[in-house]
């Protein structure tokens, strides 16, 4: 401001961009640790700071620039070669060709949301809420068995949000009560505040996955959010390089992967829908980002033994732009959004050398896809991929849909898959 003032007769001071993506007022957060609150500025506080800067004396000393320690590279870790893993997993899971699965969440019911609010308000005991979650998991498992899916999920009923739930269970994060910001369209989220060193005091997804697996003989897939996505969708401390923060989160997710595996969960999905989102705009910085973000993912997942199948899921990803990085994640199965973008990605996915599930219908629409439509997309996919590597799944999680829509859509998906399986068996 001092320099500008030397060159201009009149200076107008404002924020450098709109305040749309910060919450409104830090004073509306009575639950935050006061020491943390004193370090935060939401929109009202930022505006006050701008006013203070504009008004304050121009002759004060320059603040000293903080020195940023440089990150030591952290090795990503290696799993057994894919061929070895694929054989071990085929034997353990015994899946049919074109296995059908989903991306994780099933419809979030109004009842569950109300119950979570009641727990927060102190009017519903935690144990009763947990029983409701278990009942919902049973409903989701039975629905998938009835529909004939091959790799089941527990449905994520306990998660208010795929990042906030993780922030609530990891040290180093705070969550807000009223810190809503716009995410897209009319949807809003409350990004957690990552303010300290991240660690995992105890496992927090295992009990739900184990409960789901106890209800069925079919393999259940444990669901985790990846380190890049957790950081991308939080407000993040800036006194450490981003990669160091992401590696701390990766370490916590790695521990969760190991605990899921030890609990007998045979398939574990680590979602990274925000991988593309954090890609730097400057081309010169992109390769470095992709290298450490992929290494962080591998650090999170490489503790899994060869018979544990690792899935990853990416959406909103323009996946074709970062295909080499996606391949570098080394997941045994990758599911990507494809139906919504009209199968555009199919031309490129042949480059991924392991299992791949291009989504067969767009979950963002309430429209139920017909069986022929799904069959047509699968036939397209089979031109780009060998049948042994093709998975069948919706584009993304189902939490914004109704049970009615989900059950009709998945019934059509299973029916289309069965027709193709018969054909493949004859050829
Ligand atoms: N597992 C998450 C879900 O199904 C993935 C959501 C996402 O990709 N954005 O809801
Ligand atoms: Zn998705």
Image: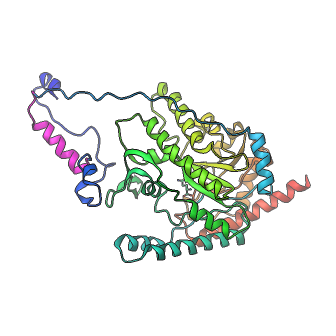
Report if residue 34 is visible in the image: yes
Residue closest to the far right: 426
The region drawn magenta spans: 41-59
Which residue is at the far top?
7
- Residue at 80%, 57% (x, y): give it: 94
The figure's colour scheme reads rainbow
Above or below, 197 against 73 in this view is below
Query: Could you say which is closer to the camera, residue 59 or residue 201?
Result: 201
Q: Tell how many labels.
A: 0
Please state the horizontal and vertical placement of residue 4, each as a whole percent of the image.
Answer: 17, 25
Quadrant the N terminus occupies: top left
Magenta highlight: main SS: helix
Q: Is 267 placed left or right of 244 in the picture?
A: right
Above/below status of 406 relative to 98:
below
- Depth check: 418 or 138 in front? 138
Left or right for 170, reference 101: left
Would residue 53 be counted in the magenta stretch? yes
* Residue at (44, 45) in percent of width and height: 231
Q: Position of residue 403 (x, y in %)?
A: 58, 71
Residue 103 seen in the figure? no
Asked which quadrant contains residue 418, the reply is bottom right
Residue 245's place in the image compared with 396, above or below, is above
Choose between 319 and 8: the one closer to the eye: 319
Percent x, y of residue 207: 57, 64
Report the residue at 62% width, 70% height from top.
140
Q: Is residue 415 in the magenta section?
A: no
Residue drawn at (8%, 32%) of the image: 57
Q: Nearer the viewer, residue 87 or 422?
A: 87
């Amino acid at each position: 401001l001092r320099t500008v003032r030397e060159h201009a007769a009149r200076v107008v001071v404002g924020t450098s961009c709109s305040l749309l993506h910060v919450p409104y007022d830090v004073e509306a957060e009575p639950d935050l640790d006061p020491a943390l609150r004193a370090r935060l500025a939401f929109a009202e506080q930022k505006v006050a700071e701008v006013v203070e800067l504009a008004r304050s004396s121009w002759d004060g000393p320059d603040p000293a620039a903080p020195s940023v320690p440089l990150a030591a590279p952290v090795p990503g870790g290696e799993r057994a070669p894919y061929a070895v893993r694929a054989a071990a997993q085929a034997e353990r899971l015994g899946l049919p060709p074109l296995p059908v699965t989903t991306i994780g969440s099933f419809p979030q019911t109004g009842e569950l949301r109300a119950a979570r609010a009641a727990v927060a308000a102190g009017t519903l005991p935690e144990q009763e809420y947990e029983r409701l979650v278990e009942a919902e998991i049973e409903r989701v498992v039975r629905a998938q068995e009835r529909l004939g899916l091959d790799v089941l999920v527990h449905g994520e009923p306990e998660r208010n949000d795929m990042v906030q739930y993780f922030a609530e269970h990891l040290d180093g994060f705070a969550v807000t009560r009223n810190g809503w910001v716009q995410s897209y369209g009319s949807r809003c989220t409350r990004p957690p505040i990552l303010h300290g060193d991240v660690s995992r005091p105890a496992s927090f997804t295992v009990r739900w996955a184990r409960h789901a697996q106890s209800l069925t003989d079919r393999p259940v897939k444990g669901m985790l959010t990846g380190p890049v996505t957790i950081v991308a969708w939080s407000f993040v401390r800036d006194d450490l390089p981003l990669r160091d923060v992401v590696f701390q989160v990766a370490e916590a997710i790695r521990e969760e992967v190991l605990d899921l595996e030890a609990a007998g969960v045979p398939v574990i999905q680590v979602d990274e829908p925000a991988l593309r989102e954090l890609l730097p705009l400057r081309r010169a910085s992109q390769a470095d980002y992709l290298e450490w973000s992929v290494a962080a993912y591998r650090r999170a997942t490489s503790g899994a033994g060869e018979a544990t199948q690792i899935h990853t899921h990416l959406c909103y990803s323009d996946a074709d732009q970062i295909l080499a990085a996606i391949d570098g994640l080394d997941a045994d199965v990758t599911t990507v959004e494809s139906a919504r973008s009209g199968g555009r990605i199919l031309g490129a996915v042949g480059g991924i050398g392991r299992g791949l599930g291009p989504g067969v219908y767009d979950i963002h629409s309430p429209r139920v896809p017909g069986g022929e439509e799904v069959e047509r997309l699968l036939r397209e996919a089979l031109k780009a991929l060998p049948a042994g590597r093709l998975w069948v799944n919706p584009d993304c999680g189902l939490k914004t849909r109704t049970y009615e829509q989900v059950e009709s859509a998945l019934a059509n998906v299973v029916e289309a898959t069965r027709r193709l399986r018969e054909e493949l068996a004859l050829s």
